[in-house]
Image (cartoon, grey):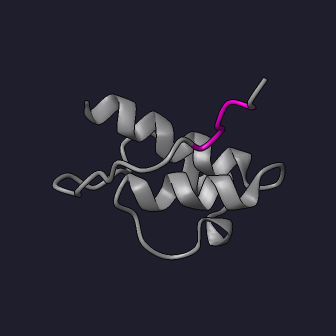
Amino acid sequence: MGDALEALRIVAILCVPAIPTTAQMVWERIGLTGDVSHERIPTSVSWGLYPAGLTVEKGEPLFPRKAK
């Protein structure tokens, strides 16, 4: 589970320019605080920076299906 959370942390940082609101929602759902847009590449995307013991939140779908 830790590797998946670490991958989500990095993906959230990399997605900020394209989908900033969704990236922030991912950031908060995996238990991180602060503004994800303040994270900087390449320092912040190093592997192993996700802190242990954070609570993961379940929420509404980030990309809900469109009604037909």
Q: Looking at the rendering, in which quadrant would you find the C terminus? A: top right
Secondary structure mainly formed by the magenta segment: loop
Q: Residue at x 66, y 62 (%)?
A: 40
Give the percent coordinates (x, y) of residue 58.
35, 48
Query: Looking at the image, which residue sits at the far left?
Result: 53
Which quadrant: the N terminus? top left
Residue 15 falls left or right of residue 26: right
Choose between 55 and 62: the one closer to the eye: 62
Q: Residue furthest front?
A: 68
Can you say whether 30 is above or below 35 in the image? above
- Relative horizontal placement of residue 47, taking residue 54 as reference (left or right): right
Q: Residue 67 lies in what quarter of the image?
A: top right
**Image point 72% across, 46% down: which residue?**
15
Q: How many marks?
A: 0
Provide residue 39's location: percent of width, then percent of height: 61, 65
Whether residue 46 can be seen here: no
- As drawn, the residue found furthest toward the bottom would be 34
Please name the residue shown 59% across and 61% down the image: 24
> Which segment did they paint magenta?
62-66
Q: Is residue 41 visible?
A: yes
Residue 63 is covered by the magenta coloring: yes
Is 65 rendered above or below residue 9? above
Q: Position of residue 59 (x, y in %)?
A: 42, 50
Residue 24 magenta-drawn?
Answer: no
Residue closest to the far right:
18
Tell me where residue 66 appears, x and y as whole percent. Answer: 75, 32
Measuring 49% from the left and 48% from the top, which residue is drawn there?
A: 60
8 versus 65 height, above or below:
below
